[in-house]
Image: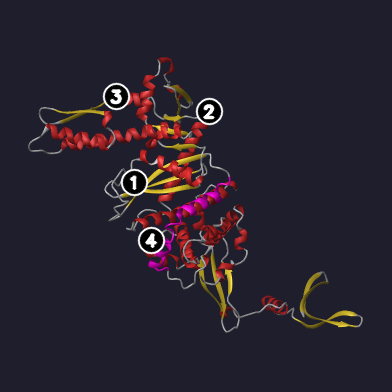
């Protein structure tokens, strides 16, 4: 049976008649007949009768219950990415199936809700993290279990890192970007790694470790090293060269790194291996180079936006700059001058019973050194024990003339890379430095709560895996015109939830349904070609536990 709507006109008016009809067969063929007329019933009742006759099950509104609506949109993207990148195969020889699933859960949590191991159970409670990683819905994410899973990485990292490189780089890497950052500890640190050193977080009062990461121009990481916190920057590069050659077979490449690693020994080591480099040198080196040039080669202020190539002492240099850097240098110097003068004024106004000229001068010198403003001031203590100071206008004017400039040094031949290409290589490194900020912030490497050296290293490796996945996703999404931060997008998508609809007093299984996707996210999913993930509930949501 079915409901048939028929239209008719009488006396210039249109009418719609709703009839319940029944089909049947006769020797002359199929026929239908009217069972009843339901035209006078309310529209919602007619709709219910039509739906029921079409075979749909109808239940009372108060019998429908929604439960277990859990965040899953970002997880759906990560599960597909994990499978596409072949990470199950790369981790196949590490630990037990359950330990591999816990590693996957820790990696996903780094991207969606970074937290300590102790807090993972609480943070995962409102999401489908356990199901997405093939774990039981009753998974407790016990801290000892997480540590055991993390420990299983020990002894397998070299092979895993090589597998990641083989998956990410189908062609040999020809341009390697190398950078360092530091991560400090709260409280005690393992003495084998945690040392006091130059802190890029401006926390010289904390022991730290150094992270050394090599990437390609897209920011996809190739190699990670965890080093002692007191290692000098200049001592890290040669070890990297050996690893890249032995583990990844890199024989020919251009290495791009910042000035902290531009020691004479490092540059000689690169040239001895017939490798090429682009590096930035210090402002002091720039000033010395400019002062040694003949008068006709001196740069003029009007050329500040122009690339200038110089060959000096059989070495090739490129001087680059721009308005943004010029403004930044001016603002940075003005801030240092203001802070220095305020500190000197405070020091001069301090009340002393017996002024000690030598002590006051020493305090002034240390204050200016700490504020990186010592070269801008001359100071003295007069006979009355009063601190006097003045700016050095000639020093400030000389530095201002070169605001915005920075000096690049390379052994690339002019035929292989002109000045724009040299600058482009270095700008790629600046993008990697931004990625490093993400590595330490949204991936939450810091603060480090582990105190065993192997667990500190494996904690960083978990973060590296999350960083690697985010870099791969960023590459895919940039090809589709999306420049947004990967973790921000994943967390937006995580607001899409998967709920279970239960019908009371009915012997029906629960029905899984996604919550309605907001229009803004729907447009984003279409742009990133992810709509198919939300057409139906994912199979892993009902997968069997490990």
**Among the two numbered marks 2 and 3 on one chain, the one whose residue lies closer to the N terminus:** 3
Between 270 and 82, the one lying in front of the other is: 270
Quadrant assignment, res 300: top left
For marks 4 and 1 on the same chain, the one whose residue lies earlier in the sequence: 4
Label 2 neighbourhood size at 10 Å, few (<14), some (14-19), many (20+)?
Answer: some
Q: Which numbered tag is attached to residue 116?
A: 4
Residue 381 visible in this rendered orientation of the protein: yes
Q: Residue at x 40, y 69 (%)?
A: 142
The residue beneath circle 2 is 418
Q: CA distance from mark 2 to mark 3?
A: 37 Å
Residue 292, disc: none
Q: Main secondary structure of the magenta part?
A: helix
Q: Determine whether the residue tagged by mark 4 lies in a helix, strand or loop.
A: loop
The answer to whether 430 appears left or right of 17 in the picture is: left
The span shown in magenta is 141-170
Task: From this view, report whether residue 373 is shown above or below residue 67.
Answer: above
Q: Looking at the rendering, which quadrant does residue 416 occupy? A: top right
- Place of residue 391 in the rendered image (x, y in percent of width and height, measured from the top left): 26, 27
Q: Secondary structure at mark 3?
A: helix
Q: Is residue 166 magenta?
A: yes
Between the C-alphas of marks 4 and 1, the distance is: 20 Å
Q: How far separated are the C-alphas under marks 2 and 1?
A: 35 Å
Q: Are marks 2 and 4 in contact (CB under 8 Å)?
A: no
Query: Marks 2 and 4, how far apart in space?
Result: 48 Å
Write down the residue under mark 3: 393
Q: Quadrant of the N terminus?
A: bottom right
Disc 3 to disc 4, how far (Cα)? 52 Å
Look at the numbered disc 2 and give the secondary structure of its residue. Answer: loop
Q: Residue drawn 34% across and 46% down? A: 201
Give 40 or 355, whichever is nearer the viewer: 355
Q: Mark 3 and mark 2 in contact (Cβ < 8 Å)?
A: no
Graded by Cα atoms within 10 Å as few (under 14), some (14 to 19) or many (20 or more), the crowding at tag 1 reads few
């Amino acid at each position: 049976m079915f409901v048939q709507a028929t239209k008719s006109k009488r006396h210039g008016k249109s009418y719609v008649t709703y009839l319940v009809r029944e089909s049947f067969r006769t020797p002359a063929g199929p026929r239908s007949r009217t069972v009843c007329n339901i035209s006078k019933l309310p529209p919602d009742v007619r709709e219910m009768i039509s739906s029921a006759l079409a075979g749909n099950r109808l239940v009372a509104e108060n019998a429908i219950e929604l439960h277990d609506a859990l965040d899953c949109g970002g997880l759906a993207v990560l599960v597909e990415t994990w499978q596409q990148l072949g990470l199950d195969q790369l981790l196949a020889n590490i630990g037990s199936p359950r330990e591999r699933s816990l590693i996957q859960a820790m990696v996903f949590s780094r991207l969606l809700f970074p937290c300590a191991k102790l807090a993972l159970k609480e943070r995962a409670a409102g999401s489908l993290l356990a199901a997405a990683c093939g774990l039981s819905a009753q998974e407790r994410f016990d801290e000892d279990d997480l540590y055991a899973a993390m420990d299983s990485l020990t002894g397998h990292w070299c092979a895993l890192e090589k597998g990641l490189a083989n998956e990410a780089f189908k062609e040999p890497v020809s341009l390697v970007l190398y950078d360092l950052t530091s991560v400090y500890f709260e409280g005690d640190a393992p003495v084998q790694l945690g040392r006091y050193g130059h802190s890029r977080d401006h926390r010289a009062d904390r022991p730290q470790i150094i992270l050394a990461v090599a990437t390609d121009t897209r920011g996809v990481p190739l190699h990670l090293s965890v080093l002692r916190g007191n290692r000098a920057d200049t001592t890290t590069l040669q070890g990297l060269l050996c690893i890249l050659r032995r583990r990844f077979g890199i024989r020919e490449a251009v290495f791009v790194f910042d000035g902290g690693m531009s020691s004479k020994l490092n540059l000689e080591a690169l040239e001895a291996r017939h490798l090429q480099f682009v590096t930035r040198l210090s402002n002091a080196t720039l000033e010395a180079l400019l002062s040694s040039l003949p008068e006709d080669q001196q740069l003029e202020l009007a050329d500040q936006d122009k690339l200038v190539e110089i060959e000096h002492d059989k070495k090739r240099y490129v001087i680059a700059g721009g308005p943004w850097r010029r403004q930044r240098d001016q603002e940075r110097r003005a801030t240092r001058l203001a802070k220095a003068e305020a500190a000197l004024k405070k020091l001069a106004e301090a009340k002393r019973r017996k002024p000690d000229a030598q002590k006051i001068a020493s305090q002034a010198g240390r204050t200016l050194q700490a504020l990186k403003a010592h070269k801008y001031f001359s100071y003295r203590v007069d006979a009355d024990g009063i601190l006097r100071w003045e700016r050095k206008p000639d020093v400030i004017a000389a530095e201002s003339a070169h605001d915005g400039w920075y000096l690049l040094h390379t052994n690339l031949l002019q035929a292989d890379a002109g000045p724009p290409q040299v600058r482009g290589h270095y700008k790629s490194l600046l993008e990697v430095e931004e990625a490093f900020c993400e590595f330490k912030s949204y991936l939450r490497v810091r603060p480090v709560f582990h105190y065993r050296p192997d667990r500190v290293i494996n904690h960083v490796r978990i973060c590296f895996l999350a960083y690697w996945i985010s870099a791969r996703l960023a590459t895919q999404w940039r090809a589709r015109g999306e420049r947004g931060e990967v973790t921000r997008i994943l967390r937006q998508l995580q607001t899409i939830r998967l709920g279970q609809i239960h019908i009371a007093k009915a012997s029906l299984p629960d029905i899984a349904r996604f919550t309605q996707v907001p229009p803004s996210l729907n447009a984003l999913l279409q742009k990133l070609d992810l709509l198919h993930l939300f057409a139906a509930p994912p199979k892993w949501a009902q997968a069997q536990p490990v």
